[in-house]
């Protein structure tokens, strides 16, 4: 899960949209999904390993990152793909976009 969005305008202060969305999800306890583990997820936290040395499946907050530089909707989408590749090491096989419109 990637929450994208940079600082919308200087008057808003040092807060970016991506981090704000993350904090809202955190405040609401991830809407009941904070401990849900998805064992088939390809997104694994670097350094999280089981005793067998394999990647451990992670809960939703551990599989969530922000993208803090996008300035518009197109950049939200494009930079999210780049951020996913940066964190996971490959591009996503499937993308779901959630929007207000």
Image (cartoon, helix red, strand yellow):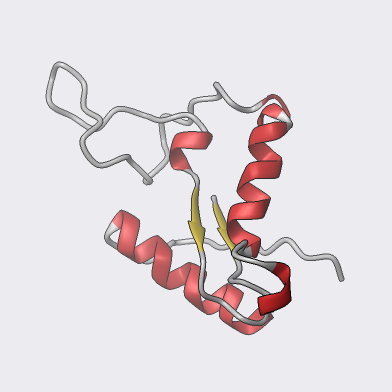
Above or below — where is 80 with respect to 37? below
Q: Is residue 11 left or right of residue 15?
A: right
Image point 41% across, 61% down: which residue? 84
Image point 32% across, 64% down: which residue? 86
Image point 41% across, 36% down: which residue? 40
| Furthest residue toward top | 51
State the image coordinates of residue 69 (x, y, percent, origin top left). Answer: 51, 74
For the C terminus, the image quarter is bottom right
**Foreground residue among 36 and 24:** 24
The total number of labels drawn is: 0
**Foreground residue among 22 and 38:** 22
Above or below — where is 47 with respect to 93? above
**Looking at the image, can residue 96 be seen?**
no
Q: Quadrant of residue 90?
A: bottom left
State the image coordinates of residue 8 (x, y, percent, origin top left). Answer: 68, 75
Q: Is residue 2 left or right of residue 32?
A: left
Image point 66% across, 53% down: which residue? 20
């Amino acid at each position: 899960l990637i929450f994208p969005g940079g600082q919308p305008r200087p008057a808003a202060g040092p807060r970016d949209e991506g981090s704000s969305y993350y904090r809202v999800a955190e405040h609401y306890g991830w809407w009941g999904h904070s401990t849900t583990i998805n064992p088939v997820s390809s997104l694994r936290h670097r350094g999280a390993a089981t005793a067998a040395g394999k990647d451990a499946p992670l809960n939703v907050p551990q599989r969530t990152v922000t993208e803090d530089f996008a300035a518009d909707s197109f950049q939200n989408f494009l930079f999210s793909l780049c951020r996913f590749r940066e964190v996971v090491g490959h591009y996503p096989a499937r993308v779901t976009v959630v929007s207000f419109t």
